[in-house]
Amino acid sequence: MLRRNSLLLLCAAVLCACAGTKAPEPVTLRSLEKRSIFLPPDKGVKADDEATIAAYREYLRKAPQELQRPEALRRLGDLEIDNADAHAAAENAARTEAQDYGRAIALYRALLRDYPAAPDRDHTLYQLAHAYELSGDLDGALRVLDQLVTEFPRTSLRQEAQFRRGELLFTTRRYPEAERAYATLLQEAGPTPFFERALYMQGWSRYKQGRLEDALQAFFAVLDLKLIARPVEGGLDAVTGLTRADRELIEDTLRVTSLCLENLQGADSIPAFMGTGLRADYEYRIYEQLGELYLRQERTKDAADTFAAFARRHPLDPQAPLLQARVIEIYQQGGFDNLVLQSKKEFVESYGASSAFRRANPTAWEKVAPLIRSDLGDLARVDHAAAQKGHRQEDYAAAIHWYRELLTGFPTDPQAAQANFLLAELLFENGRFAEAAAEYEKAAYHYLRHAHSADAGYAALLAYAEEEKRIPASERTAVQMSAIESALRFGDAFPADPRAGVVLANAAEKLYARHDYERAIAVGRQVLAMAPPAAPEQQRVAATVVAHAAFDNGAFASAEKAYLALLALIPAQDPARIALTERLAASVYKQGELARSQGRSHDAVDNFLRVANVAPASPVRATAQFDAAAVLIELKDWPRAARTLEDFRSRYPDHPLQPDVVDKLALVYSESGQWNLAAGEFERLGARKADVALARSALWQAAELYEKGGAPAEAARVYERYVRNFADPLAPAIEARARLAHLAAQAGEAARTLQWQRELVQAEQAGGAQRNERTRFLGATAALALADPAFQEYRKVALVEPLKKQLKLKKAKLEDVLKAYTAAANYGVADIATAATFHTAQLYQDFGQALLASQRPKGLSADELEQYNVLLEEQAYPFEEKAIALHELNARHSADGIYDEWVRQSYRALAQLRPVRYGKGELSEDAIDAIR
């Protein structure tokens, strides 16, 4: 609608002034364009509508032919409308004075009639229609608006004109035409200021025609514009970005939407209009408004079903629990107790602490948490009472379920401790003892102290006891451990409770039985330190646990003190004292063992010997004395060790450790230099040992000690006994024969020496798989030694007349010696092989030299003697070459890393035999000695 502006008064004044001036030619606005007009500073014009209207009327009267007349008529019409509006508002009266608007109507009609081509005709038509409407002539207004949109289909006023047409048509109940008018406006390209209202009124137009589903399409389109992307909880006042007019529009749209749905299928009709997910932002408001409509109509069931329908359709929506809560509220107000109970069950199951709703909407859940807490409490109480009354399993299960849900969702609630205790009681009554124990513990220890704390803690122990009776023995370990922990918690939390002493003493026994010694000791001491004191029986139990646990835990000094304290609590005639005294002795003995293991040998000896003082009749005493001797041996306190062992031998002649005494005395005598005494102990030991290996070892040690003690005859006797009794295994038996040969040689018994050497070689060569490097070495050594008698026999034969006979004999002896050396060399022992090779080479050299030095036949002429000597040299030469070859063979061992005395002797011999080749400075040695 066009309104006047601040130039109207100025324009009217100028027109009037021009009209009253006499001039050669008419003064017009066009003529004013060519004139220069000086305007003094504007002092301001006081607006006066009546004066302005009068000025325009005067202008029209005096200038009937002026070009500005159409504009003046239009502006005067506008002023008349404004003036009529002002009078009506001032008088606070209805616009019934048609003549107030009639002047404006007349002016507009005159303008349209007299000036059909005047500019802004479309605006004039619009203003005329407006004037008709204000005067109450709706049909007239509608005719003019029809004319306007017909004549000017593209006018800038077409949108407002169509909207007003729609409103006029709707007001006059011409709903189909109104719908078309709104539709024309809605088809405009681009946004228009009338779009939302036109859409809203289009819906109403359809509603009035009874086309409810079509109407809903329009109404939902309005809601889409205003509520999509504004998912705010609560009333519309909380929705951001809405003006007051927006909120009024939304409220009206929601109301008429509810009316449409009511007349269709109610809540069942809503999903059909929620096809796009965007409408989820306000969908709950649709259900809410429809439900409230039903409530106003006192249709309780329909209202409850509507609220519940949204919750079922969108269980995770933040508004779902609020609408579901309204269902409970409605049933409560209506007195439907069964429905209330069922609704509460559905509510807590859908929105409880472990629900998917909570995970999806933690913030929204916090807002409905008080309702959930209250409903869970009500449900638990109802089912608990039913279970106690009827003892039906389903009632127990339901009540337990509700209590658990309550505690899970609201663990810090002021009533949580009481609820936890009731849950535990219910579980116990239902025979679910393990679960009951756990809940009793929570009730006792997880909350601030309350009236049932101590009772809950003790009840947990009773529940564990019942559970232990119920399950198989193979499954009781875990329950027993839990019961122990619970008992300890009870004692710590409620030390003044009369039941604490019994509970802790029992726990101490169980901990000891489970080998948890440190905790058993701690709990036992806790009982002994109770104030007021625990009962005597509980003290005795606790002291027994402390002593036994300390002993089993290796705290033997503490165990000794504990047993002494325990014995002080037990009457003198009590049979239990005997076993406890033994434990006391064992505690002292164990201290000795511990000291020994820690390297505190003197303390070990003192503790072992102290056993005789604390428990002289204890069987432990003998073991302790023996162990004391062992430690004295470790300390090398030989005299004291010998006295202790000798006392043990005399005091306990039948003790199983007597064989070990022999061992230890043998060692003590050995270490103190009493070799023959030590040898006697070992010989005794060898005779008593059932174990063949130990007997062999003892006999061998006896022989060595006799040898060391300067008793070679005794040593030889024992070695010979060894060989005769223990030919197997081979190695020590061969060693013994070697020692026997050595002792015989020392004694000058050549025949016995050769006997043992021969027996050694025979036994070694027959040893088979038991032969080793050592046996071979000893065998080779003995074989080499056995060559010496043959060599001596060889040396005794002189090459004298009769030379032929003597030469034959010497060659035979030579062969015997060579066989002996070959036997020694065949052992493959490097040192012996090189010696045998060297001696063989020397033997060949000696034989050649013996030939050259042999006695010459008598009666030979000089020529014959010379010829004889040549023949001898020819006979001796091969032996010398053989000797050289053997020496060279021996020398070559140096390339294999063998450069012993015999290799060096071969080098020296070669230097003499072949000085050109082997007589170099670095190889020159003193002349070799003659063999043997």
Image: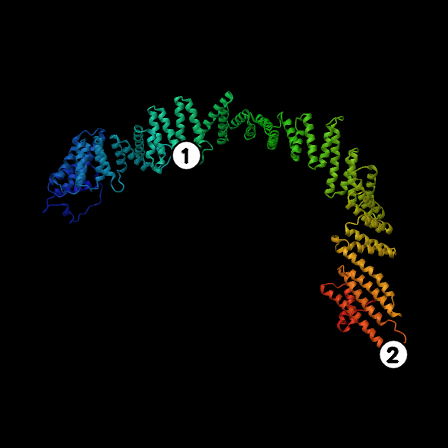
Q: How many neighbours does mark 1 have within 10 angstroms: few (below 14), some (14-19), or many (20 or more)?
A: some
Spatial separation of the CA atoms under disc 2 and disc 1: 146 Å
- Rendered-image quadrant of the C terminus: bottom right
Report the residue at 34% width, 26% height from top: 294
Q: Which residue is mark 1?
A: 316
Instruction: Name the residue tied to disc 2.
Output: 862
Residue 667: x, y in percent?
80, 46
- First in sequence, mark 2 or 1: give its number: 1
Instruction: Report the amino acid beneath label 1.
Output: Leu
> Going 32% across and 37% down the picture, which residue do you hit?
224
Horizontal and vertical percent position of residue 629: 79, 41
- Secondary structure, mark 2, is helix
Q: Quadrant of residue 528?
A: top right
Query: Please, what is the three-letter code of the amino acid marked with disc 2?
Result: Ala
Residue at the extreme left: 24
Q: Where does the image place residue 678, in percent across and percent down from the top left? A: 83, 46
